Image: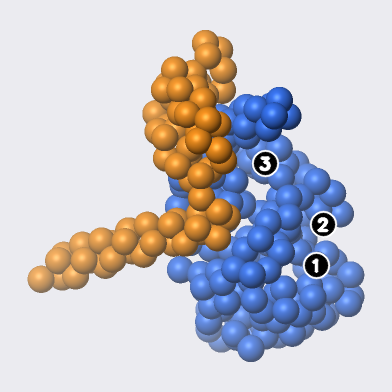
């Protein structure tokens, strides 16, 4: 994605056109800046980032379980 | 959690025909949702089912959630007698889907699949349009919940394409 494309999409994400799916998603509570950041990554980087977040969530879950046992 | 890279290496290395669908496909199209299992739609020819079996058998596939004593032989004959299998393997959870709600079987899923470079392999991933259609058809709360994000992503991809075409 070029710098100009990124800038244009960023503006769209910040101020989605009325009636657009982007506006609907924003109203639904979706943080589209996360999606935009993902689109600047390669497919492999998207997977690696998601897996890192998943590992973090799993570590938190296990910590909570261990805490509950004490 | 699935070892996606290793699973991809095994499946691609065996020459199996498959398309990545569902959660990992959403991630690959830019979704921010997390997923822990790999779902693939596989071609249901005898040759391809043999390839799937040879790719995954070393990782001891068994039916996820089933009692340990329930007999399960992971071979092409078993695959041919079923359709969708939810498996637990040494690589993590893998769902083998012969049929996808709203899309159908492998040929319909593969027809407009995107080809993406992943970990050094070229991997087919269900198109965003088809992913949206399948989520809508599945109709469960967890599927409908991701639709606003996927539809916004489709619009973002379209905006990006239209700017590509102007250049």
Q: Which mark is residue B128?
A: 3
Residue B66: x percent and y percent? 55, 74
Q: Quadrant of residue B123?
A: bottom right
Q: Quadrant of residue B89?
A: bottom right
Closer to the eye: label 1 or 2:
1
Residue B47: x percent and y percent? 88, 77
Circles 1 and 3: CB distance less than 8 Å? Answer: no
Tell which circle, 1 or 3, labels the residue nearer the N-terminal end: 1
Which chain, by letter, is blue? B
In the rendered view, would you say B113 is above or below A56? Answer: above
Q: Residue beneath label 1, please?
A: B17
Q: Residue beneath label 2, please?
A: B106
Residue A50: x percent and y percent? 45, 56
- Evaluate whether residue B147 shows in this view: no
- Gap between marks 1 and 3 measured at Cα: 19 Å
| Rendered residue at 44%/33% (across/down) | A32
Residue nearer the viewer, B23 or B128: B128
Give the colour of chain A.
Answer: orange
Residue B154: x percent and y percent? 63, 33
Secondary structure beneath label 2: helix
Quadrant containing the C terminus of chain B is: top right
- Evaluate whether residue B167 shows in this view: yes
């Amino acid at each position: 994605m070029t710098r100009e494309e990124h800038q244009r999409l960023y503006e769209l994400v910040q101020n989605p056109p009325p009636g657009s799916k982007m506006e609907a998603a924003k109203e639904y509570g979706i943080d589209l800046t996360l999606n935009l950041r993902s689109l600047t990554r390669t497919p492999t980087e998207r997977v690696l980032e998601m897996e890192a977040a998943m590992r973090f969530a799993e570590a938190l879950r296990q910590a909570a379980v261990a805490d509950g046992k004490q | 959690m699935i070892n996606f890279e290793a699973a991809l290496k095994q499946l691609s290395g065996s020459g199996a025909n498959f398309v990545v669908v569902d959660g990992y496909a959403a991630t690959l199209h830019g979704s921010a949702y997390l997923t822990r299992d790999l779902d693939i739609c596989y071609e249901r020819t005898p040759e391809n089912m043999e390839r799937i079996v040879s790719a995954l058998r070393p990782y001891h596939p068994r039916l996820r959630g089933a009692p340990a004593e329930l007999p399960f032989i992971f071979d092409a004959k078993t695959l041919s007698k079923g359709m969708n299998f939810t498996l637990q393997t040494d690589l993590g959870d893998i769902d083998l889907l012969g049929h996808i709600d709203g899309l159908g079987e492998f040929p319909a899923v593969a027809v407009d699949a995107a080809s993406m470079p992943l970990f050094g392999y070229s991997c087919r991933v269900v198109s965003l349009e088809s992913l949206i259609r399948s989520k809508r058809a599945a109709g469960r709360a967890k599927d409908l919940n991701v639709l606003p994000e996927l539809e916004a992503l489709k619009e973002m991809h379209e905006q990006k394409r239209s700017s590509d075409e102007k250049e």
